[in-house]
Image (tube, rainbow, N blue to C red):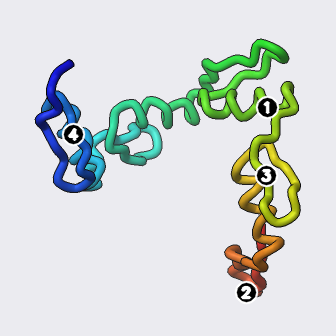
Amino acid sequence: MREKSFQCNESGKAFNCSSLLKKCQIIHLGEKKYKCDICGKVFNQKRYLAYHHRCHTGEKPYKCNQCGKTFSYKSSLVIHKAIHTGEKPHKCNECGKVFNQKAYLASHHRLHTGEKPYKCEECDKVFSR
């Protein structure tokens, strides 16, 4: 195993080659050199541009083996699969209600806290979701 002699001053992460250190540093600098030629959005890594490009092309390379539904992102497929298994790994500590997505739990939790982070620009009314 190679020694990780390239260390990032920002994050403290160490790498065994300078190119990985450079990628880490680009993230911290906010340097975005990969631009979408369709909408102009910019990204700091080429792979993120490739992922983004799918929203323009409609490409959905990830397919559910159970129902055939397709997804643009692997993470979306993973979340979708919980529908078939019934898995709900995210539990509210307040009331015990369970959710299949972390975002749903976060939204639910605002019912307990009373937090209302969303505001209507027209009437200034605030909402929890």
Per the image, the residue denoted by label 1 is: 82
Give, as a three-letter code, the residue at label 1.
Answer: Ala
CA separation in Å, label 3 and label 4: 35 Å
Q: Position of residue 114 (x, y in %)?
A: 78, 79
| Residue at 86%, 57% in the rendered image | 96
Q: Dot 4: few (<14), some (14–19), or many (≥20) neighbours within 10 Å? A: some
Using the image, tell me which numbered label, if any, was put on residue 124. 2
Q: Position of residue 32 (x, y in %)?
A: 29, 48
Q: Residue furthest bottom?
A: 124
Secondary structure under tag 1 reads helix
Q: Dot 1: few (<14), some (14–19), or many (≥20) neighbours within 10 Å? A: some
Per the image, the residue denoted by label 3 is: 91
Using the image, determine if residue 42 lies above or below residue 58. below
Q: Are marks 2 and 4 in contact (CB under 8 Å)?
A: no
The tag earlier along the polypeptide, 2 or 4, is 4
Per the image, the residue denoted by label 4 is: 14
Image quadrant assignment for residue 55: top right
The tag earlier along the polypeptide, 2 or 3, is 3
The tag earlier along the polypeptide, 3 or 4, is 4
Using the image, determine if residue 46 lies above or below residue 121. above
CA separation in Å, label 2 and label 1: 37 Å
Image quadrant assignment for residue 106: bottom right
Secondary structure under tag 3 reads strand
| Residue at 81%, 73% in the rendered image | 112
Give, as a three-letter code, the residue at label 2.
Answer: Asp
Q: Dot 3: few (<14), some (14–19), or many (≥20) neighbours within 10 Å? A: some
Give, as a three-letter code, the residue at label 3.
Answer: Lys
